[in-house]
Image (tube, rainbow, N blue to C red):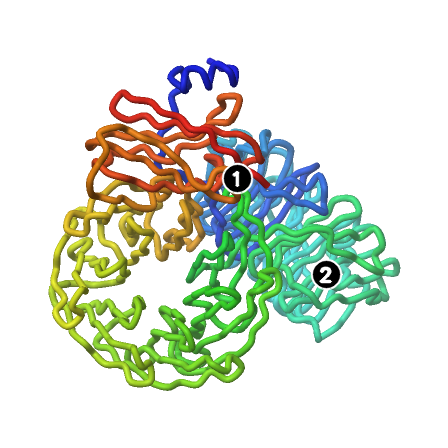
Amino acid sequence: MRFSPVRLILTLLVLVPISPRADISQCYLIEAGNSQAVDVHGDWMLGGLGRYLLVVDVSDGSEPTRLASEYVSGGISAIEWVGDRAYVASGYGLLIYDVSNPLDPEMLGEELSASASDVAVVGDVAYVTRSTTGFRSVDVSNPSNPIVVGVGTAQGWPRGIRAVGTFAYVSGFMGDLAIMDLSNPATPTQVGFHAIWGDGWDLDVVDTLAYVPGSGGLAIIDVSNPAAPMELGRYEDFSLYSPRCVAVVGDYAYLCDQAYTFAVVDISDPSTPLLVTQIDDIGANAIAKRGSQVFTANVGSSFTVRSIADPTNPSVEGSVHGLSRSYAIALQDRVLYAGTDVNAATIDVQSPHDPAFLGYADGYGIFSALYPSGSRLYAGRSDPYFDGNLGGLSIFDIGDPTSPDELSYVFNLDSAYDVEARGSYAYVLGFFQGHKIRIHDITNEAIPAEVSTINLSPVAENFDLSGSLLLVANQANDLGIYDVTNPPTPVLRSTFTATEDARDVCVIGEAAFVADRAVGLIVVDLSDPDLPVEIGRLANVGQPDYIVAKNPYVVLCGSDPLLRVVDVSTPEAPTLVDSFQTGGSYEIAVEGSTIATITRPDASIAILNAPILNVVSHIAGNVSSNLSLSAHPNPFNPSTTITIVVPTRRFVELDIFDLAGRYVCALVEADMPGGMHLVTWDGRDAAGSIVASGVYFCRLRAGGEVLSRKLVLLK
């Protein structure tokens, strides 16, 4: 049912559509993993990113757009797209998807007798390699029930495979080329073999020539006689580090290694292949071709479209980014900072349903803790092997988040777990031969100086700073409360010992909220830091490992499948108000109504919208006997605070509509006590996107009463 603006105003929104519930919803999942596979078909690209099959619109190579993803058990090592089906080689075996509608890939069947390294399809048979056991033929005529119909042995630990006619060409780990006769899929038989060099991964076959990359270059093999393959020529360049993939287009071979090299080789004379150009920008694990373009699954977690219209000058048209494994996240000014095992990515989440990668803060090692503050990003670093060689603190200038600039790096042996900064000091909690917090004077950002150390016992991974207090969640059985009025000489004020397995802590006002894996949520009164007292507790919130404050709420997550939002406006009686199924989370960051969390087990990042977080405060006291609704500022840009006065406890719904009566978003749908409540609307719709300037209406429904107010958003 639709309404005119006039009807909408005259009836005070009594006759309006029923608003949807304002529960937490997922806006986007930033998949994590290594880019290992790629194939392209028409206007679409399929990419293998860790355990995710990505669907990307590449109709415009300069703006590749990720449109869908599908979780794939076992990870993806190769993709073969044939007609309406995608054949995926995974760590568990062969998976078959219907991709007739690329926006909604549907699993048809799977063959899981062994893991798969690569796959090639001829007719109704898929030929699958596995490095340790060779080669198998799978009947895929009934894709819902693929059946192994033959097993063969390809010499040299087979990896890559290409099938042409009745022959399969297989590259091996030892750098060999094996040729298999497929005339009888039940008995695939090796008929030819040629030893080339070590560490072979991929190959391409065009007409009667096979192009095989390996350690140090590219070999060109004449396979016109499958029983006697003969090497015609080879391009050797031992500066190439283990070339992983090759694509041949016309008279050129495009060769990628794992050490940031993209090479173009002229193969017009197979006996003397010549280097045309070499670009040192990014390495790749897989490559696919389409006309005058090649698509690479890059080392790390991205995919690139390159134009090869001019083979002497291949150029990047566009890229699609994922993340390698995420370790830390933070939110500031609608920018998400994601710490991975190779860098810290900066991601624009102005539109949570369509995040855009901005840039990277680079540095070797894991970015395991992040704290943005104004134009600075403080990054706790850890060694990727956790043996205490590359820990420490980095400070980045993020005034331009598209190009973070490292100002300094303080090396120490600790693997960092948490980091914060206040004033002229940065605090880093880490571990190497014991847990400790190192306090650094950052007055001179180019040369931060360690001024003191707090040794912790036995295990601690998270802390929070509140004014002059530093609170540490110790996993044994206590909450340590330190006075850091003078950071060079921190003083232990007291220890709260009523916890059992404290994992994290945050502070709102004079209350500390402790995520205790054994107990749940514990609330501690800090009005006298020397005598902390428990004043509240909430069980049945899973086994929380992390907690973040968003006054008057805290958000908890951990190994439990649910992320939870708890109302702590009355600290003595914390109340669970919302939850969302994540499957378990490692970290949380909150800004406005946006929640970012690192999901288990693959360390992807889920971006959530939690409308309940728009309720910023509850003010008790004398309450009017009338329901009331107002907003200030109004007109506004970019946000306004909506004030609700509820005479008595009621179920309250606060929704936003545009001038035509169309639903925009739900700000509140919750049971509220009597009193004044302040709610923020940041000018975004239910999808998290910024709405256009113009006239809007907020509608309040409570206890059978309905009020509305006009809001004007200016740009």
* Identity, as a three-letter code, of the amino acid under mark 1: Ser
Q: Are marks 1 and 2 in contact (CB under 8 Å)?
A: no
Quadrant housing residue 558: bottom left
Q: What residue is at 49 percent from the left and 59 percent from the top?
A: 337
Number of residues whose C-alpha sits closer than 10 Å to that of mark 1, classed few (under 14), some (14–19) or many (20 or more):
some
Is 396 on the left or on the right of 515, as rendered? Answer: right
Q: Quadrant of the C terminus?
A: top right
Mark 2: secondary structure: strand
Locate residue 329: give its quadrant: bottom left
Q: Is residue 314 left or right of residue 286?
A: right
Q: Amino acid at mark 2?
A: Leu
* Label disc, if present, on residue 255 of the rendered structure: 2
The residue that disc 1 covers is 689
Q: Residue shown at 20%/72% (left/top)?
A: 480
- Above or below, 346 against 538 in this view is below
Q: Residue at x 17, y 60 (%)?
A: 524
What percent of the width, then of the height, locates residue 621?
A: 20, 43
